[in-house]
Image: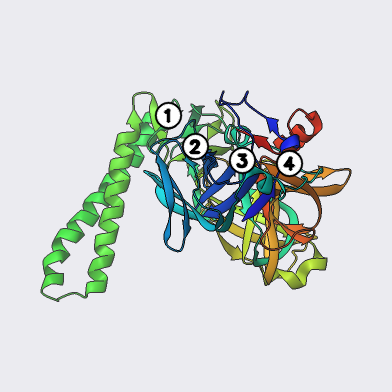
């Protein structure tokens, strides 16, 4: 719970935001519960005086205002008290219930929100009700002059998020480079099945579907050539079909072994497939070469119009869905290789990151060896392309190894760099922040370990730090408390 006591002479107004009017405020509290933040401002409670509570409710998962719901505020002492409810916010995220205390003393203050997004209760264990305004004014204190004010209405309009500082497991990180490669089993070499001149219908990099026409082979002697191949294929098919029909009942009566029959059946299916494929490939223009898989053209081995022989390798087709990401570890880190258990990757622009989990990846090789032509240790990961990877692409790699049990860890987005020093913004109140220098350790491309500068339990801005920096530089937002 964050509490601030503000001097009335230092109060500011930000009534240009959302057009709501502002009253004098003395106290503010910031509380967190069940995925919600409550930032409430109200005058010191005084007997006989109606105090309006300006209660800002934020859903922390999205850092957006609560747009509907019923709020009840109560003060309770010895199981007795008073309460007041409002059925909707006065403006997005801001509820304004009011109370008029009857007796001085120390009370428990409750805020109970019921909405379609969830129900939540916030409790302030002790709040004082004063006998008169003069008594209440004696408790007011000056503000911290170094605090930066960034209003809830401003935060709600931008991408913003905060996170409580906690200890959590982290790890050592090997920071290196990686390259996207194809898996060997995902590439297919397509050969010509006739002699003649080849006419290509595809280019390198073209996406293709299984059964799509790739090329046609034609020649002056094509008809005799292909007719011979078709006849040979038909003879093989008819022979294996006869063998299959003849041996099927023999296998049923166990006159021949099951192993021999399965071999005959397999040959029959292969010859059948070969014959019908060849028959479907023949046109008046020549022999069609069709794609056997979905993928893209990753290599063309001949020139358009070139003469090819039967069996000539024409082109290569790769399936870009299944990939390998090969990272490279320096020899000085070889002792860390066996401990690698996860990885993150960053693209060349440095802004976009992907985790191994996002691409359904896993480690497939991390042996500590170096090839004859290599200078670094290869570590390979399988990957399913999420549409962001491309063969031959280079990546920045963050290989996780050597887990640590207790570390303070923040997203890299929380950091502001100034002259080779790093800072974060620590939330000191609902709309007040302190710029704090921190010392960082290694990062995994997404998270970084904080060595010093923060304490467990503090709350740090993880998205929107740059907006707060601009607000501080502009100097057009109030440093001290404001009233709504």
Q: Residue at x 48, y 26 (%)?
A: 201
Q: In which quarter of the image is the C terminus?
A: top right
Q: Distance between the Cα atoms at labels 2 and 1?
A: 92 Å
For label 1, the residue is 221
Disc nearer the start of the sequence (2/1): 2
Disc nearer the start of the sequence (2/3): 2
Q: Nearer the viewer, mark 2 or mark 1?
A: 2
Q: Which residue is drawn at 58% across and 63% down?
A: 363
> SS class of the residue under badge 1?
loop
With 46 as the anchor, is 96 left or right in this view?
Answer: left
Residue contact at pointers 2 and 3, CB within 8 angstroms: no
Q: Distance between the Cα atoms at labels 2 and 3?
A: 24 Å
With 136 as the anchor, is 46 left or right in this view?
Answer: left
Disc nearer the start of the sequence (2/4): 4
Q: Distance between the Cα atoms at labels 2 and 4?
A: 21 Å
For label 3, the residue is 160
* Numbered circle sitting on residue 96: 2
Residue 424 position in % (x across, y down): 75, 48
């Amino acid at each position: 719970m964050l509490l601030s006591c503000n001097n009335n002479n230092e109060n500011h107004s930000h009534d240009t935001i959302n057009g709501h009017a502002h009253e004098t405020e003395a106290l503010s509290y910031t509380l967190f519960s069940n995925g919600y933040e409550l930032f409430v401002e109200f005058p010191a409670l005084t007997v006989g005086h109606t105090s309006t509570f300006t209660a800002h409710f934020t859903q922390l998962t999205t850092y957006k205002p609560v747009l509907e719901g019923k709020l009840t505020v109560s003060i309770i002492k010895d199981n007795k008290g008073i309460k007041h409810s409002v059925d909707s916010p006065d403006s997005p995220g801001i509820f304004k219930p009011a109370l008029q205390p009857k007796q001085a003393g120390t009370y428990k203050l409750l805020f109970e929100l019921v909405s379609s997004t969830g129900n939540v209760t916030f409790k302030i264990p002790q709040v004082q009700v004063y006998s008169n305004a003069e008594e209440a004014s004696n408790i007011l204190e000056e503000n911290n002059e170094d605090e930066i004010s960034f209003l809830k209405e401003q935060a709600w309009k931008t991408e913003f998020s905060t996170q409580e500082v906690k200890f959590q497991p982290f790890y050592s990180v090997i920071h290196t480079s990686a390259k996207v490669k194809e898996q060997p089993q995902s590439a297919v070499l397509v050969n010509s099945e006739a002699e003649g001149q080849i006419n290509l219908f595809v280019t390198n990099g073209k996406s293709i579907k299984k059964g799509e026409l790739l090329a046609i082979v034609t020649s002056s002697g094509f008809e005799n050539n292909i007719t011979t191949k078709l006849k040979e294929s038909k003879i093989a098919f008819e022979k294996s079909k006869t063998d299959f029909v003849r041996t099927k009942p023999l296998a049923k009566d166990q006159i021949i072994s099951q192993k021999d029959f399965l071999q005959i059946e397999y040959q029959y299916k292969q010859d059948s497939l070969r014959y019908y494929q060849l028959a479907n490939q023949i046109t008046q223009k020549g022999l069609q070469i069709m794609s056997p898989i979905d993928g893209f053209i990753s290599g063309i081995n001949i020139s358009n119009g070139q003469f090819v022989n039967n069996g000539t390798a024409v082109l290569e087709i790769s399936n870009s869905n299944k990939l390998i990401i090969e990272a490279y570890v320096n020899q000085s880190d070889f002792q860390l290789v066996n401990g690698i258990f996860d990885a993150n990757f960053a693209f060349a622009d440095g802004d976009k990151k992907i985790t191994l989990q996002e691409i359904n990846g896993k480690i497939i090789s991390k042996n500590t060896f170096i090839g004859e032509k290599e200078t670094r240790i290869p570590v390979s990961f399988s990957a399913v392309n999420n549409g962001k990877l491309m063969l031959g692409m280079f990546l920045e790699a963050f290989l996780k190894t050597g887990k640590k049990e207790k570390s303070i860890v923040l997203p890299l987005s929380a950091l502001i760099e100034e002259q080779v020093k790093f800072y974060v913004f620590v939330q000191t109140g609902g709309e007040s922040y302190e710029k704090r220098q921190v010392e960082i350790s290694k990062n995994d491309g997404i998270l970084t370990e904080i060595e010093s500068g923060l304490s467990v339990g503090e709350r740090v801005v993880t998205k929107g730090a740059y907006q707060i920096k601009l607000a501080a530089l502009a100097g057009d937002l109030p440093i001290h408390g404001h009233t709504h």
